């Protein structure tokens, strides 16, 4: 068995003070290669501070942050070459044309000539920037500014993408497009994103962390809320047949039939990466027609509200 991959982001006991105010309090977490991790928290909870420390813009007061093997304090340049950051306010040079800005950013990231042109053309195509490439950034709508900011982050093929409110200001069509883009990026990148739009985080992220008052309440909100894996399975078979086949898969604990919908079952099992695939393989091998297999996840909004309800608010 090959050795497990090292975390691409490792945060250990990090605290950050701004003078007398503590913005981040003893936070620790790890992010594995290829994960899309959502970071949630009320305003002022420390999300942006953590992002700025991860990207080398701020230095932790104490603790250690490693990004792709680089210490953010001892090798800030190495971190900046590994991470691309999209702040919430999508900062651009308003006097520069979009194409000019992207070529400028490509040069900063060490891309020149044909490589720079290919990177800019590819990013522009993925974000559908063709109609605005000749416009100055100051004339762009909020949505296009956001898309240009994300496009520059894709230049240079950074291992880690840090996105602060990436769908802020976008219309529904653009939100869907950016959501699909972020999900596709996990093939080659590790993504850490913050958003106030809980349904977006729920649809995009493979894991959700929640902050409150600078403290990390959970590094996997949905898993903590529901330790067992629950699958909705729809198949053209009796409950006895499904139990006989899927129940034999290692880790499956219980299978119950939906009393309201024929041929639909709820499978409760231990959490492991290949379990759903093993259930599918077992059903296919037994020639049981499978119509649906989806994970039943807890309501993220309810989990978030329960965890972040301050004592005075609950009184």
Image (cartoon, rainbow, N blue to C red):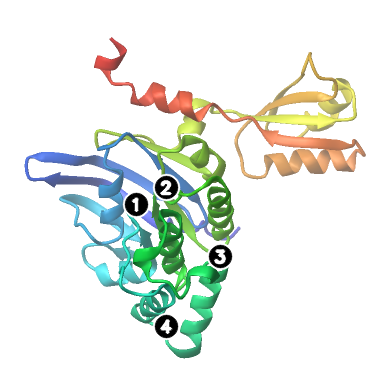
Image marks 3 and 4: residues in contact by CB distance under 8 Å: no
Q: Residue 175 placed where, x, y %?
A: 53, 48
Q: Residue at x 85, y 24 (%)?
A: 263
Q: Are marks 1 and 2 in contact (CB under 8 Å)?
A: yes
Disc 3 versus disc 1: nearer the observer: 3
Disc 4 marks which residue? Answer: 111
Q: Quadrant of the N terminus?
A: bottom right
What percent of the width, then of the height, locates residue 157?
47, 71
Label 2 Cα neighbours within 10 Å, binned few <14 / some 14-19 / many ≥20: some
In front: 118, or 288? 118
Classify 250 as above or below 136: above
* Residue 68 appears anywhere in the view: no
State which tag comes first along the sequence, 4 or 2: 4
Looking at the picture, how far across and down is residue 305, in whole percent? 40, 24
Look at discs 4 and 1 and give the one toward the viewer.
Answer: 1
What residue did someone put label 1 on?
Answer: 88
Identify the residue under disc 3.
Answer: 128
Going by the picture, which residue comes out furthest to the left? 20
Would residue 194 appear left or right of 292 to someone viewing this image? Answer: left
């Amino acid at each position: 068995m090959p050795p497990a991959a090292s975390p691409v982001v490792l945060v250990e006991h990090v605290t950050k003070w701004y003078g007398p105010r503590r913005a981040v309090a003893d936070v620790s977490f790890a992010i594995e290669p290829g994960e899309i991790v959502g970071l949630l928290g009320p305003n002022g909870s420390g999300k942006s501070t953590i992002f700025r420390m991860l990207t080398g813009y701020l230095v932790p007061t104490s603790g250690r942050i490693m990004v792709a093997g680089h210490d953010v304090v001892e090798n800030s340049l190495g971190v900046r070459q590994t991470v691309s950051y999209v702040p919430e306010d999508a900062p651009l040079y308003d006097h520069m044309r979009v194409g000019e800005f992207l070529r400028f950013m490509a040069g900063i990231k060490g891309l020149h000539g044909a490589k720079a042109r290919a990177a800019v053309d590819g990013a522009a195509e993925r974000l559908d920037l063709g109609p605005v490439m000749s416009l100055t950034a100051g004339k762009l709508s909020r949505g296009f500014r956001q898309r240009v900011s994300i496009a520059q982050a894709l230049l240079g093929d950074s291992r880690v993408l840090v996105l602060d409110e990436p769908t802020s200001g976008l219309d529904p069509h653009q939100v869907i497009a950016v959501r699909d883009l972020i999900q596709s990026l996990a093939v080659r990148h590790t993504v850490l994103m913050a958003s106030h739009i809980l349904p977006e985080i729920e649809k995009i992220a493979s894991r959700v962390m929640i902050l409150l008052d600078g403290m990390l309440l959970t590094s996997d909100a949905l898993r903590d809320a529901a330790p067992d894996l629950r699958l909705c399975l729809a198949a053209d078979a009796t409950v006895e047949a499904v139990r006989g086949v899927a129940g034999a898969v290692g880790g499956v604990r219980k299978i119950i039939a939906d009393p309201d919908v024929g041929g639909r079952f709820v499978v409760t099992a231990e959490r492991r990466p290949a379990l759903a695939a093993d259930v599918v393989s077992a059903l296919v091998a037994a020639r049981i027609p499978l119509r649906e297999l989806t994970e039943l996840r807890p309501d993220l909004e309810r989990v978030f509200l329960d965890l972040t309800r301050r004592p005075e608010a609950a009184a």
